Image: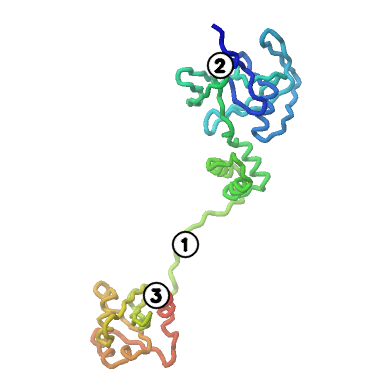
Amino acid sequence: MEEDAALVTLLTDVDVFHGACLDTGAQRTVIGNSQAKAYLASICRDAKLATSKDLGRYRLGGGSYVTIGIVHIRVPIAEDFFLPLTVNSMDLNLPFLMGLDILDVYRMYFNNMTNHLVCINEVVSVPLVRNFGHVYLDWGSSILYTFPELQRNLKNFYHAKPERLYALMRRAKDEHATPKTLRQLENVTEACDLCQRLAQEPSRFRVAMPDEDICFNKRVMIDIMTLEQTSVLHGVDRDTLFSAATFFHNKMDTKSVWEAFLCIWVSAYAGYPEQLHADKGKNLQSQEWKQMMRNARIKPLDSGIESHNSLVAGELYHMMLR
């Protein structure tokens, strides 16, 4: 029974990086020239291979081949762990063959029952895919930034804040800039001595007492105003700026003004105010009103003639009602 050569071949597309092939039983890790260039293109690097002083020699299919250069590949095993590999490249159309030398060093093995690459050192298992009749560790474009790369970016942009640097990366439409990158930038900033020395001091809550004593319900300022042809009674405490208001839906006289004030104010809990500063008005200047103040032992304070802003805080708070 003959197998279909298209299913078991190791030849791959030239322009697409397929990841690491794990089930070939290769003793040493190696990559073909086309896949090396495809990997460099996927991370936006120059397709030129690095040179090595010692050229390696590999046996494949009964022939002997000499390496033409090296490529530095970063293989993601976990969210924050990468395998920094220096892989020899040959002038053959081969995939990235991860050999037993790397699997033994990092204590990894391929579980063909679950299609996972198990890393004992990091206690993680990475899902695998089957392409061309073989098993591949294909991480595609999900290559994240490493700690040294983020440190280099931070220094190149003069130790910018993590939020600003991350926003710049997003505006540049960097597909590798994910929310995890922002957390990594924050970790890089915390580890940077210069960023910590030049960082803004954390804000603190400062509490200070005013020069004058604050006493609630000492002086209350009341005024009668009109909103959409409806009379409104508005009262404001001078020291705490606590305010309350109510509408007059029926006929407004001195007695109804007094009852409305008792309804909106906290007299049942704090008692009557010591002083009641009223604006100029017919009901607030009548003898009946002053008699009610004396019965409640409240000292009445009147505004002067044409003193339109005498209530100060009281009239300032009218804007909230309007």
Q: Residues within 10 Å of mark 2 (few under 14, many from 20)?
A: some
Q: Would you name the residue on which mark 2 appears?
A: 23
Q: Would you name the residue on which mark 3 appears?
A: 321
Q: What residue type is labelled 2?
A: Asp
Q: What residue type is labelled 1?
A: Arg
Residue 206's disc number: 1
The answer to whether mark 1 and mark 2 are in CB contact below 8 A is no
Which secondary structure, mark 3?
helix
Q: In the rendering, at what x and y percent does residue 319 appear? A: 43, 76
Instruction: Using the numbered discs, state the Cα–Cα distance from disc 1 to disc 3 in whole angstroms.
Output: 31 Å
Of mark 1 and mark 3, the one earlier in the sequence is 1
Q: Residue at x 28, y 93 (%)?
A: 287
Of mark 3 and mark 2, the one earlier in the sequence is 2
Q: What residue type is labelled 3?
A: Leu
Q: Which residue is drawn at 37% across and 89% down?
A: 280
Q: Nearer the viewer, residue 237 or 114?
A: 114
Q: Report whether 94 appears left or right of 215.
A: right
Q: Nearer the viewer, residue 238 or 322?
A: 322
Residue 69's disc number: none
How are the colours assigned in the image? rainbow
- Numbered disc in front, either 1 or 2: 2
Residue 43's quadrant in the figure?
top right
Q: How crowded is mark 3: few (under 14 residues within 10 Å), some or many (20 or more)?
A: few
Q: In the rendering, at what x and y percent does residue 258 appear? A: 27, 83
271 over 62 or under it: above or below: below
The answer to whether mark 3 and mark 2 are in CB contact below 8 A is no
Which secondary structure, mark 1?
loop
